[in-house]
Amino acid sequence: MKQWQLQAPGLESLRLEEVDPPGPPGAGEVTVRLHAASLNYRDVLILESRYDPSQTYPVIPLSDGAGEVVATGEGVTGFRAGDRVAGAFSQTWLDGVPDYIPRHGSLGGALTGVAQAYRTFPAHGLVHVPPHLDSVQASTLPCAAVTAWHALYERGPLRPGDSVLLQGSGGVSLFALQLACAGGARVVHLTGSPGKEAILRDMGADHVINYRTTPDWDKAVLEHTDGRGVDRVVDVGGPDTLPKALSCTRHGGRISMVGVLAGGRVELQLLAAIARNISLDAIFVGSRTMFQRLNRALQAHQLVPVVDRVFPFEELPAAVGYLRSGAHTGKIALRIAPDDGARGTARG
Ligand SMILES: NC(=O)c1ccc[n+]([C@@H]2O[C@H](COP(=O)([O-])OP(=O)(O)OC[C@H]3O[C@@H](n4cnc5c(N)ncnc54)[C@H](OP(=O)(O)O)[C@@H]3O)[C@@H](O)[C@H]2O)c1
């Protein structure tokens, strides 16, 4: 079977190899024929060896994939052949507050990823996917969608009428837009791409601000909220956005710190957060149980992930280049095997 391998640090060491398919699954295991995988910014960091200094090689990349169960091992009760499933981002963080580091159990980094035709998972590392989604759409859920869900609904849950500040038109932010709108929130959405403004409005953003032409966008957000500030922020920019997000968040508001698009170091006026009782919440993807709760919400609201472009499996390097360009809106996917029948439409 085909398998992508990062054989040494650096994107130039990415190779498509032919390897033996997995043997029969062991007790408690499930073998999945992967139909699709999707990319996250984290995959770019891993492929460029900028994610984890202790990373060992080869890496089988990509954390997010979906497909069909082809075999189950002894004692597996929750899955059977033909079930449509996705792998949980962390294969070890099942529920609750982990007393270990979930990153050490995550796919496509510490553990073998999904950039391959088949993968055997422990049964507890899989979830059933919402039936209204095809495999490409389902493959976009494990990292970006679970992260957006965790930020908005698992910590001080969003309430109808809340105002939410979102940034950019990448995977996490578009899931956050869909989930916030479904929960009755009003969204102020930043983008640096004029061509994407109409897409964000069509998807339900109440107010769109271009962060390039309006560098003082925090003031614009305050004006839009009658000087009060937003209730919630899902921050993906890091140093570029967090200080301004802090200045346009209301007293008692919550900032979910999710992304590092502009780097990992930031200077913050802590008194501005302390004096206004603002919760600064660091978010790392989420547990398997959160993934299952997300899936129930997606099904209930018939939400369909926004997939910008699907590349053939063999074109992973081109897909990575497209993600790095920032030209995309929503998710970028790879088709690994012929589909199981499209259920939703490509643009949510
Ligand atoms: N904590 C976690 O568990 C977790 C999980 C998933 C992702 N992340 C992180 O969250 C971030 C977003 O991930 P993603 O997969 O959604 O990324 P993505 O799909 O690559 O999104 C990139 C988009 O963000 C916007 N953008 C780029 N630079 C920006 C900046 N400096 N300030 C504001 N917006 C900017 C651009 O949209 P416009 O063209 O509209 O401006 C760009 O298209 C990444 O740092 C990723 O590592 C963290």
Image (cartoon, rainbow, N blue to C red):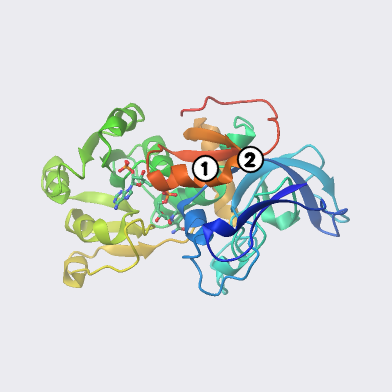
Residue 112, percent across and down? 67, 60
- Pointer 1 residue: 318
- Secondary structure at badge 2 equals helix
Q: Can the viewer see residue 78 in this picture?
A: no
Relative horizontal placement of residue 285, taking residue 337 as reference (left or right) = left
Q: Nearer the viewer, mark 2 or mark 1?
A: 1
Label 2, ligand 1: CB separation under 8 Å: no
The kind of residue on which mark 2 rests is Phe
Q: Quadrant of residue 255?
A: bottom left
Q: Quadrant of residue 106?
A: bottom right
- Pointer 2 residue: 313
Residue 301, percent across and down? 49, 32
Judge the density around disc 2: few (<14), some (14-19), many (≥20) Cα neighbours within 10 Å. many
Judge the density around disc 1: few (<14), some (14-19), many (≥20) Cα neighbours within 10 Å. few
Q: Can the viewer see residue 199 in this picture?
A: yes
Up-down: is 329 above or below 94? above
The kind of residue on which mark 1 rests is Ala
Q: Nearer the viewer, residue 29 or 184?
A: 29
Count of labels shown? 2
Residue 229, percent across and down? 18, 50
Q: Nearer the viewer, residue 247 or 194?
A: 194
